[in-house]
Amino acid sequence: MKKLLFTGTALALLMAATSCDKDTLVEDPRSVLVPGFFGTPDGIQAGLIGVYSGLRNITADQGGSNFMSQGTDEFMRGFGTSNGFEDYNAGEMSSTNGTATNLWNAFYGNINTANGVLQYAGTVQGLAPAAVNQIVAETKVLRAWNYFYLVQSFGDVPLMLKFVDTPTKDIARAPLADVYNAIVADLNDALNPTTGISNTAAQPGRVTRATALHLLAKVHLTRATSTARAADDYTKAAQFAEELIRDASKYGKGLETDPAQVFAEGNENGKEVLMNVQFNADPVFTGISDNGAGGAGQNQTNFLFRVRYDLLPNMARSIQYGRPFGRLGSTPYLLDSYKLASETTPRQWRTTDTRYAKWFSTLWLVNGIGGNSGTAFNPRAVVGDTAAWYAGRELTAAEQARINSRPNGRYVVGTPSTYTTNFSPYINKYDDATRAAVNNSSDRPLIFYRLAETYLIAAEANMYLGRTTEAVNQINTIRRRAAAPGRTAQMEITAAQLNIDFILEERTRELCGEFTRWYDLVRTGKLVERVKRYVPAYVGSKPSPIPGGTDQYGSNAARNIQAFHVLRPIPQQEIDRTSGKITQNTGY
């Protein structure tokens, strides 16, 4: 029997023979496809689970996180290795960029596997019609998801809706409108009331009707500002988002009452979650690695945002505080976005909106007496006492004097004027304290879509439709949840405050670090403007929080970014393999 191996756009992803139980999707990796692979019920199920498995190669490792989050107003270059996306470095962000190439291959590998499932599912003996309908509906949601991120990233892309079983160079980029039409058609099919997707998931990690509604609303919102726009895109974005909000309980969904609960360890399949990518503590299933950087397909979000707490006096690396990996550094804009105009003194900053206190780490406790010249810095340090506090404001001389004269000695104080690449607050949404080793990647499922974003999608669409009251109410629903006790009124906005910049800022406050920011800024036409406005220029040396210490800070993103950066570079391998039929995006 002839084996099928493909490269590039026609790549066949590693397939998986699978079984299912109520708790997880069980995978047995395979390296090749054969023509008869989809000829049995097990093969069809394996194909579908193979597409789910392929999501890991796009979302949770450093390549996917960098691709979707770097180079925005929220994040600047961290202390880790550069890949070009964080500062638009022309020498690295090119047609030979490894991250862009790997993700292109992963997208099309998933799509080709999905095409195989869709092409053969209806012909297999032994699958009940209801099972076929569910498999087809799930697969169409996943194919639409892959194409949605392809088209947002690269613009016109090859549109392949049939399973590729022979290598070919006859591939070209399809018009943006054709790709969006295919995405919308897949999602509408999945939502068919007779043959569509189920309301609830058979196992955690499977997509449901709630996932499809959210994704379809997001697709219409995004297409509305593209050259492929349809006249009713905003109407449909609001319609599908509001259907999900209205019927959330039908799907077992709803907003958590406390923002802290959304990302609490163990709640990754919680009621607010609409889509996640499954990981667990099984090293075979998850690809857990203690090899330092790790590899593709691992969940590395637990250390991509983390700063160098391990360089602070009297501190050492620990499972509790994680591995400092430093790919995404918080910008001043991100940290300041939680301030309210009604907070008139520095001590009040970020006390009304509780999301900052709940989703950012600013305090470290002594765990390594004497480490990093700790004895010289504070010979009275005690394990469990404060080692460092990043205050979010400048301290007065009297406040610093009180810290210096504490019975247990002083601790490091970070302030905005001393925040650096290595020392600043960071997002803790993905912390994982259950790992077996400090350097291990996370075994937590990765939350990708949640209901809070659905409210913000509806609000943005309604704003463009002139339905201001609805938009304000939808935003205020999210903001009220984040209010400190007794401060709900201060968190509510009025119609006069509603504009696209406010919505982008609210998306920062609610969704920072959740793989959406670069796409948000491109969708709204704000990428270049906001990167130039909010990303601080790179400086090689500035005072750090450690007395007498210096460190680098900032990024060259504002200097380097250009209008053509609203698209990523097409991998050169695709251009070469198709003899130029696939063309390059402008500027690369």
Image: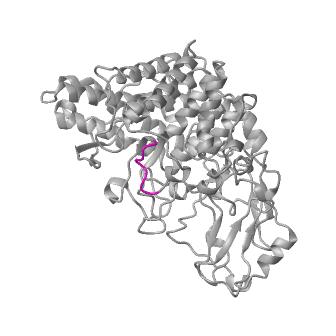
Seen in the picture, residue 252 relative to 486 is either above or below; the reply is above
Residue 468 % position (x, y) = 66, 23
Residue 553 % position (x, y) = 75, 57
Secondary structure mainly formed by the magenta segment: loop
Image mark count? 0
Residue furthest toward the front? 486
Find the magenta span and give its range.
265-272
Residue furthest toward the top? 231
For image coordinates 59% across by 20% down, the residue present is: 224
In which quadrant is the C terminus drawn? top right
Left-right relation of 366 to 166: right
Q: Quadrant of residue 17?
A: top left
Q: Is residue 329 magenta?
A: no
In which quadrant is the N terminus drawn? top left
Q: Is residue 268 visible?
A: yes
For image coordinates 60% across by 48% down, the residue present is: 83
Q: Is residue 266 magenta?
A: yes
Residue 282 % position (x, y) = 32, 59
Residue furthest toward the left? 126
Residue 184 % position (x, y) = 45, 20
Q: Nearer the viewer, residue 205 or 473?
A: 473
Q: Is residue 588 visible?
A: no
Left-right relation of 573 to 535: left
For image coordinates 48% across by 42% down, the residue present is: 448
Q: Quadrant of residue 306?
A: bottom right
